Amino acid sequence: MWTLQTPPSLQPPYFPLNPVAASYSYRSISIAFRQHYSTISTKPTTFSHNYNDSIQSFCKKGQLKEALQLLFHEPNPTQRTYELLILSCSHNHSLSHALTVHRKLIDDGFEQDPFLATKLINMFSDLDSIDRVRQVFDKISNRTIFLWNAFFRALTLAGHGLEVLDFYRRMNIPSDRFTYTYVLKACVASESLLPKGKEIHGHILRHGYECHLHIMTTLIDVYARFGCVGNASRVFREMPEKNLVSWSAMIACYAKNGKPLEALEVFREMMSYDMLPNSVTMVSVLQACAALAALEQGKLLHGYILRKGLDSILPVLSALVIMYARCGALELGRRVFDQMSKRDVVAWNSMISSYGIHGFGAKAIEIFREMIRHGVSPSPISFVSVLGACSHAGLVAEGKQLFDSMSKEHKIYPSVEHYACMVDLLGRANQLEEAATIIQDMRIEPGPKVWGSLLGSCRIHCNVELAERASRRLFQLEPTNAGNYVLLADIYAEARMWDEVKQVRKLLEAKGLRKVSGCSWIEVKRKIYALHSVDEINMHIEQSHAFLLKLSTEMKQNGYVPDTRIVLYDLEEEEKERILLGHSEKLAVAFGLINSSKGETIRISKNLRLCEDCHSFTKLISKYTNREILVRDINRFHHFRDGVCSCGDYW
DNA sequence: TTAGGGTTAG
């Protein structure tokens, strides 16, 4: 045992915690300690005082400042003491304290300790200080697998996935099962890394980890993020073992990649194995219901959420708000929102965007302002939501004012998404030149979203010249996005420029691209049906098609004039009309009318934007059949009642 | 010592 005497010149509390000021002082203190202890006897005595225990105890109680003060009175801090100090710095989220601990740890000769270096890497990663993570890693000569894994985790979290892959290639010790989860996640850093992800998938199989649940779940997630639903599904199906997390990952994969029906199918399958969903599963399943406008399914899920007590979990509640709003039951979504005991920015954003897609721009702005009054700071997504709401409602002046306030009042600097909203807002309102000027004056590189918004507006207002300008840029930026070519062809077709339409179609074919086919979903008696524009096999479609032909004839007698301008082929009028009648949303309307009782509201969801002909057709149908018809397209809601649409023909 | 799935927009 040591006899410990506090040096007389260093009575606590003394230690400055400012890292810059501290760097000199601590070194002096260290020297003072060494000099002091060189003079005292090493002979054990009966009296002892262990500061290590006290420091550790302070750390465990979260009293970091007190722990640090004692640290400078302890001549031999142990590895455990430093471990707890490092953890405590992470919990306190204090970079200045972290730097103090790091310096003292070096002074005490622990710089080469791989265990503490691993902890330091985790700490600096938690404190978003990636440069210090690199510093710690560089210093260590004996790099353990723990150290490598912590380093990979930190780099991936900081968005430096490419660097992870580079280090992974140069790693001089064997990977373990943890390494693969980090390295796989690193591949998500860039779209171009899919081949790398597949290569690592190969390494995993070669090392016999094909049955490892954590790694396989990460693989499902990584393939999902690349949009490779087939690969994700194969990994999932070929696994001998599944648990709630892997089932949930597969459901989320489908829900996120435009396959909501498949998401519900996997959910049903999961339930058939008596695997009970948790809040994470529920969020994905609610998203799938929202995508399908499957209100009855959604209500069943809400019942389950209440029974299982999942109704205090914020993400679940936000997902419920969105689900109801996207199923056309905005008021039910509002009720969930009103009953929330606390609301984070995501909950507020959910309500803002819900009003937005229903065309209630002023209401969306009101909720946005209420959020600020409640002391919740808007996020970048709040602005995307509220600007989008302005756009749908044609609130140009309000949108401009909000866009202005972003940087001035909220210190949020516009990203491409915000510029895309502004271009959309102005473009829809036929202020195309001003929209083009916004792009010209942008301080950041206008990405495909911005040019896409301009092209979309050119489509609404049939501006060929500007459309050609926007599409030239878009074809460079997104050479494989078929939607852009189709939009330009639409514009040419409307302008009766058939040679140009042919050229664009040839370009599309030469690139081997295919137009995304239209698909509408409708729920009938809690069962969801998908109707595709080109589906000729499905019996439901045939029945609906026959009914549609009959309806169309009757509608023509009541003033319906098919809008054949949007057909991309130079055909006879009759042929064009036939093509128009094959649109998935018309088939879904007919299917809904056949399979529901009088007075029942028809709810349809569509994967693309509603076309002009379907819009005017559905308006007339709602009057002719005296039905309310809700159609949600990729952008917003259309509430058809008595021959009028809630969008006011502005979409 | 370390790891897997979920919220809002476009």
Image (tube, rainbow, N blue to C red):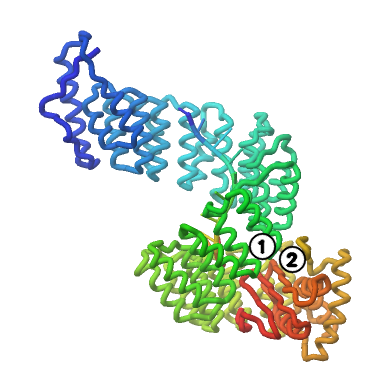
In the image, residue A36 sits, relative to residue A223, either above or below, namely above
Give the chain letter at badge 1. A
Q: Residue at x 26, y 24 (%)?
A: A51
Residue A225, position as x, y percentages in the image: 61, 51
Q: Would you say A249 lies left or right of A126 here?
A: right
In the rendered image, which quarter contains the C terminus of chain A? bottom right
Q: Nearer the viewer, residue A252 or A215?
A: A252
Q: Would you say A489 lies left or right of A358 here?
A: right
Query: In terms of secondary structure, where does tag 1 sit?
Result: helix
Q: Amino acid at mark 2?
A: Trp
Few, some or many C-alpha atoms within 10 Å of disc 2 (few <14, some 14-19, many ≥20)?
many
Q: Are marks 2 and 1 in contact (CB under 8 Å)?
A: yes
Residue A89, position as x, y percentages in the image: 34, 38
Determine the residue located farthest toward the left in the rendered image. A8
> What's the distance in space between the residues labelled 2 and 1, CA to CA?
9 Å
Q: Amino acid at mark 1?
A: Ala
Q: Nearer the viewer, residue A507 or A295?
A: A295
Q: Which residue, given by chain and number where applicable, does mark 1 sit on?
A: A291
Q: Residue at x 46, y 60 (%)?
A: A345
Query: In terms of secondary structure, where does tag 2 sit?
Result: strand
Q: Residue at x 14, y 29 (%)?
A: A10
Q: Which mark is residue A304?
A: none
Residue A633, position as x, y percentages in the image: 66, 71
In the image, residue A24 sits, relative to residue A559, either above or below, namely above
Few, some or many C-alpha atoms within 10 Å of disc 1 (few <14, some 14-19, many ≥20)?
many
Give the chain letter at badge 2. A
Q: Which residue, given by chain and number where applicable, does mark 2 sit on?
A: A521
Specify whether residue A637 is in view: yes
In the image, residue A140 sits, relative to residue A567, either above or below, namely above
Numbered circles on residues, count: 2
N-terminal of the pair, mark 2 or mark 1, is 1
